[in-house]
Image (tube, rainbow, N blue to C red):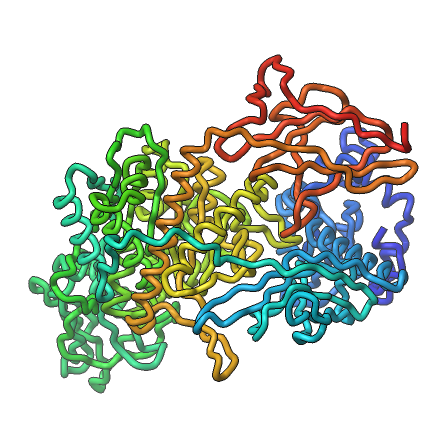
Amino acid sequence: MRMIRKPAWAKVRRRWLALPLALMLCLALIPVASGAVTQPGLVPPDRKSSFEQDGVALVRIVVPDQAGIDRLQRMGVDLAEYTKPVAGGIEVNAVLSPQESADLKAKGFDVRGAIADQADAAKVRRQRSQALNSLAAQAQGTDTLTALRAEWFTSLPDGQRFLNVEVKTSDSSATNILTVAWDSGRGTEIGSGGTATMSRFTDDGQYMYDRFNSPLPVNVTPSKVRITSTSGGSVTVSVTKWLGEPRKKPNPHYVSDFVDHYMDPEEVYQRIDSLAKEFPELTQLINLPYKTNGYRRAAQAQFGTAAASTFYVSSKAYGSDGGNDISVALENPGSAGAALSVSVTGKNVVVHLATDASGQVTSTAAQVVAALGADPAAAKQLTASTYRGDAGAGVVAAAPATRLSDGLKAPASVKRQPFQVQALRIGAKRNGSRPGVFLYCQEHAREWVTPLTCVETAERLLRNYQHDPATRKLVDNLDIFVVPSVNPDGANYSMYDYNFQRRNMTNYCGPADSDPARRNAWGVDVNRNFSVGSSFDGYSGGSANCRGETYSGPSELSEPEAKNEVWLTQKYSNIKFAMNTHSYGGYFMWPPGAYKLDGRQTLPPVDLGTETYFWSASAHILNAVQQWRGTAIWPGRTGPVTDVLYSAAGNSADEAWYDQGIIGWDFEVGADKYDAQTGEYDEVGFQPDFAEGHEEAMEFANGQIGILEVALAYSKDKKDPRSSLSVTGQDASSTKFTFKVNEPATVYYTLDGSRPTLKSPKLEAAGLREGAESLTVDKTTDVRWFSVDIAGNVENNYRPDGRHTGYRHEVVRVGGH
Ligand SMILES: [Zn+2]
């Protein structure tokens, strides 16, 4: 009862207190049909009980005067203890269901936006329970530390060694500081190698774990680390090696390195086309059905300097389709008392400005805009708008005939027409019988290294087919689809006009945001335009602002670039793996890639078996990357997108995984480079010097080949996994156990003696970046289970859907019984 508890507003609105609590309760509960409510009742049909309050929110209502408050009061509206004089009356706050809001609006009340809703409270509750957990840990005098990862690896320059540690503490309060100490090799004292303080990693207000901000360069290889906290926790773990497993030496006849400059999309697709012609028996070119909007724009001109007297015109035809030939002049008639008029001769538009009795020009920007709109011949060719939503009351100045221009600077070789995006399909058997792998690059225009990566991979596969048995295996047994530049229009714009262009070129902004100086701010972020976990579904990381860098577009899958990807993966249902290559930072990532704010509600995390598979695949793929010049992708940049980067609502890898079960991975090429002189890590940027860009393309082409090797292993995997049950803890009243598997696999189990099926509970991770959970039973239990690997092989060839009894079973005893 917000109203009754110490009402702050009572000093001002004391009369409200006269309404007794009992009556308030009655008003809230008595249905309107009972007729017991004498005032026109606002009875909440959708507030069934205190447990079913979906959509209830604290909202603002502005009433003209005290009588309005009284009216709400009589209707039994749940008002907060708050009033504020505002323009047009008094603001009060009310707790309303959506239905109540609608009813009040129908009764003519000015109901405004929400101050808080139930999700906000859920967030505050989570904060509270986190704080309580921390306090409980502090009260115990010690926190529990869980070491997630402790690894060493080598990377540039010159095989420099690095240490990476990730630890979770049960006391995530800011005052709890974690320190890592390491030895200087087997048998040496902990601390002899060095010590370093860790940083708390939080995301959306939620504690994730402690880590170093970047891997620590070390001079010796540590064998053990001890992590201690100021809350008294301590844990010691062995350091393992990250990456660097020896790979087979490449065949001496293996050829690579086919790119020697940054390529624009015309060059990229010409290369793909010529490869298709040269290797007809191994390839096929697929025209993707949705042509892009094209590298083209409306032609524009802007007149005026101050906002009020400024307006701009945009051609209806693209600049390349005749818009660039239009001219507009603002003519001072040179006589007194002239009226505003427009005349059009062919593509030449003349605005004859109005003058007053003394011959001074009087036409305002708004009047000229209106006159151009009203003249049918002008309106057929162009639209006119005031500047950024200004009322346009300033008088315009005369101006000579000015040619409109689309401003595009690319040479004529870049065609001003919708772009035909193509996929190069590579495989000796391209009939859908082989597992498909979809490699696609340059969704983001400014990431210039990425199309080179795709082109290099395609060319390596084709040119090594004859002489390299490993390549032949890939091409013979897989069905590979390469789309080297998903977003060619944006890519051209990035190369020739505005290098930081990320999005495509389609402008969805209204007149207030479409003046020529806004031209670099238009376009849709292709990798936010997909339909799974999108900003339209409430996920974070996509913008609704047409000028936002992550603008999601007007609706899901509105853009041809995004639709092409979906079409390809639906049409070729044998596609099982996909790699979305971006830049920069040096990442290897997988779903989920998006969460909702208010507690970081991610898309469903992959199950433990799949997660384990992703880690083991990443080891193979990142070893391949490292083989080129020694670059290590950091463990801290390997993992689900939401855990290692940020939330990217509506991205294509989530679309692939959640919608079609395609393993959708993401690369960010261009790992940070450690400078041993300064001890700092340098970012490489979107368009590094070509010498660096070339190396990035080569090493990540290695990575793409690594993905193909993983796909090949998947296609050959006919071996069923093996699992075992292992007791992890025991006391008088309960026993803890988990399952171990000999390869990445998901374990399904039952504890009630029933047959395990694919609907049974799965063994889950103990937590973010942690291994398998332990299950606890408090009585002797007949545990039944089976495991399934990523290729679908079931342990002991058990058939979970039939009546088969070939599952595993074991009795877990409690208290020695
Ligand atoms: Zn990108």
**Does 129 sit above or below residue 610?**
below
- Depth check, front residue: 738 or 269: 738
- Depth check, front residue: 640 or 6: 640
- In the picture provided, is 46 more to the left or to the right than 528? right
Q: Quadrant of the C terminus?
A: top right
Q: Please name the residue shown 57% across and 64% down the image.
A: 152
Find the residue positioned furthest to the top. 803
Q: Looking at the picture, how far across and down is residue 227, in whole percent? A: 73, 66
Q: Please name the residue shown 70% across and 59% down the image.
A: 237
| One can see residue 634 in this view | yes
Q: Please name the residue shown 14% across and 83% down the image.
A: 334
Q: Please name the residue shown 71% across and 36% down the image.
A: 46
Q: Looking at the picture, how far across and down is residue 499, in whole percent? A: 30, 69
Find the residue positioned furthest to the left. 346
- In the picture provided, is 652 more to the left or to the right than 816? left
- Depth check, front residue: 27 or 702: 702
- Depth check, front residue: 145 or 330: 145
Q: Looking at the picture, how far across and down is residue 751, in whole percent? A: 76, 26
**Does 200 sit above or below residue 780?**
below
Q: Quadrant of residue 182?
A: bottom right
- In the picture provided, is 144 more to the left or to the right than 685? right
Q: Quadrant of residue 246?
A: bottom left
**Does 418 sit above or below residue 404?**
above
Q: Quadrant of residue 713?
A: top left
Q: Looking at the picture, how far across and down is residue 230, in whole percent? A: 80, 71
| One can see residue 511 in this view | no
- In the picture provided, is 354 more to the left or to the right than 85? left
